[in-house]
Image: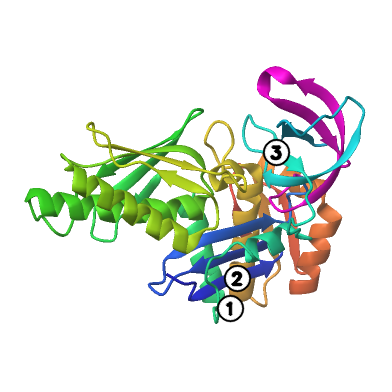
């Protein structure tokens, strides 16, 4: 499987790229809202840091980067750092909810990327001849894809769906065959469902930047030969999409296929949703600004007001000068941004 095209958007809301295969399905996503000014480490970044504390019980040390971010360095026999020592490290995985970014000491052969976008571009297995699509229609497709990342459900190509539930310990994935187009029964039909689910799970893992322990609850009883075929199907599909380290076991007698994948970027659901699974203010502001862009393009002669809920408005206000410069460069002086009295996103005339 190769990358056929990349949907791209860069505007007042920020920047987003979505790599898609030849069937138009998204495979990997780069999301950088203008409101996010975090200096969090990204995989492939070279960082200078200082050792703050040893954590022998956890097999490593806590470091602090030059930007102030806490990092965790796993130790091996060759690592002998002391508190206060300065070092250069290589980021293996970004910080995620409840976990610090993981790093190791920099090596001479490490491939370093100057930006998170550069690291994303280099993370594909096959990207030759991919078309770049940057149109109002592709921007709407990106909006739809981001919205789908806010839900735990992914539809299978032949009907049915996967429900993807990240927890503290692992990612649990359930297969629901309701609504499936084909109702073929028997062992072959069940295997077809499971293979399709395994292939779709591989895509969703890449798209959602999931990692760690992942368990797929397969459908029906699985013979030993079918289990090995299912494992191969998952691994073959995943390895066409991602360069991350992956392992998988054939399904157990309970029908559970266990998968382990190296973490990379922060999972997209953690960036789009807050701890209570509501839209993060960054996401809300992104959606509002995208709506403004669409409305302003259609209502070219009108003076418009973008009304924002409280949290999104506070985020906008924290960089109001920068945002208004971006809006003015695109639409002139006919746009104003205010707090919504009804606590919802609206674009109105003034």
The image shows residue 49, relative to residue 141, as above or below, that is: above
Question: On the rendered structure, is 195 left or right of 115?
Answer: left
Please tell me whether mark 3 sits on a helix, a strand or a loop: strand
- Residues at marks 3 and 1 touching, judged by CB atoms closer than 8 Å: no
Rendered residue at 38%/59% (across/down):
236
Q: Residue furthest top?
A: 57
Residue under pointer 1: 132
**Comes first in the chain, label 1 or label 2:** 2
Q: Residues within 10 Å of mark 3 (few under 14, many from 20)?
A: many
The image shows residue 303, relative to residue 173, as above or below, that is: below
Rendered residue at 27%/48% (across/down):
228
**Comes first in the chain, label 2 or label 3:** 2
Please tell me whether mark 2 sits on a helix, a strand or a loop: strand
Q: Is residue 150 visible?
A: no
Question: On the rendered structure, is 140 left or right of 160?
Answer: right
- Residues at marks 1 and 2 touching, judged by CB atoms closer than 8 Å: yes
In front: label 2 or label 3: 3
User: What is the span of residues highlighted in magenta in the rendered image?
Assistant: 40-67
Residue under pointer 2: 8
CA–CA distance in space, label 2 to label 3? 27 Å
- Asked where in the image residue 299 lies, by quadrant, the reply is bottom right
Comparing 286 with 102, the one in front is: 102
User: Magenta span has 161?
Assistant: no
Question: On the rendered structure, is 21 left or right of 227?
Answer: right
Please tell me whether mark 1 sits on a helix, a strand or a loop: strand
**Comes first in the chain, label 3 or label 1:** 3
Residue under pointer 3: 101
């Amino acid at each position: 499987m190769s990358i056929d095209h990349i949907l791209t958007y860069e505007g007042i809301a920020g920047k987003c790229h979505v790599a898609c295969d030849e069937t138009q399905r998204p495979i990997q996503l780069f999301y950088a809202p203008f409101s996010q000014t975090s200096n969090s480490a990204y995989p492939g970044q070279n960082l200078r840091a200082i050792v703050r504390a040893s954590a022998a019980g956890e097999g490593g040390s806590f470091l602090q980067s030059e930007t102030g971010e806490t990092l965790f360095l796993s130790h091996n026999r060759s690592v002998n750092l002391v508190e206060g020592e300065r070092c250069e490290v290589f980021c293996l995985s970004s910080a995620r909810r409840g976990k610090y970014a993981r790093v190791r000491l920099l090596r001479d052969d490490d491939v370093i990327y100057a930006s998170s976008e550069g690291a994303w571009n280099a993370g594909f297995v096959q990207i030759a001849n991919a078309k770049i699509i940057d149109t109002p229609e592709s921007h709407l497709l990106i909006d739809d894809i981001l919205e789908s990342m806010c839900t735990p459900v992914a539809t299978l190509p032949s009907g049915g769906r996967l429900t993807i539930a990240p927890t503290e310990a692992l990612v649990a994935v359930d297969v629901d065959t309701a609504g499936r187009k084909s109702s073929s029964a028997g062992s072959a039909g069940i295997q077809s469902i499971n293979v399709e689910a395994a292939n779709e799970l591989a895509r969703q893992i890449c798209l959602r930047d999931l990692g760690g322990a992942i368990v797929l609850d397969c459908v029906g009883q699985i013979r030993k030969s079918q289990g090995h075929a299912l494992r191969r199907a998952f691994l073959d599909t995943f390895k066409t999409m991602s360069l991350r380290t992956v392992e998988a076991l054939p399904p157990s007698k309970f029908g559970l296929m266990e998968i382990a994948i190296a973490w990379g970027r922060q999972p997209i659901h953690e960036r789009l949703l807050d701890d209570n699974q509501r839209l993060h203010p960054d996401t809300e502001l992104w959606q509002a600004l995208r709506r403004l862009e669409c409305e302003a393009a259609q209502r070219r002669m009108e003076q418009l007001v973008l009304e924002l809920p409280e949290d999104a408005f506070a985020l906008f206000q924290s960089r109001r000068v920068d945002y208004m410069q971006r809006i003015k460069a695109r639409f002139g002086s006919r746009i104003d941004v205010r707090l919504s009295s009804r606590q919802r996103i609206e674009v109105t005339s003034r």
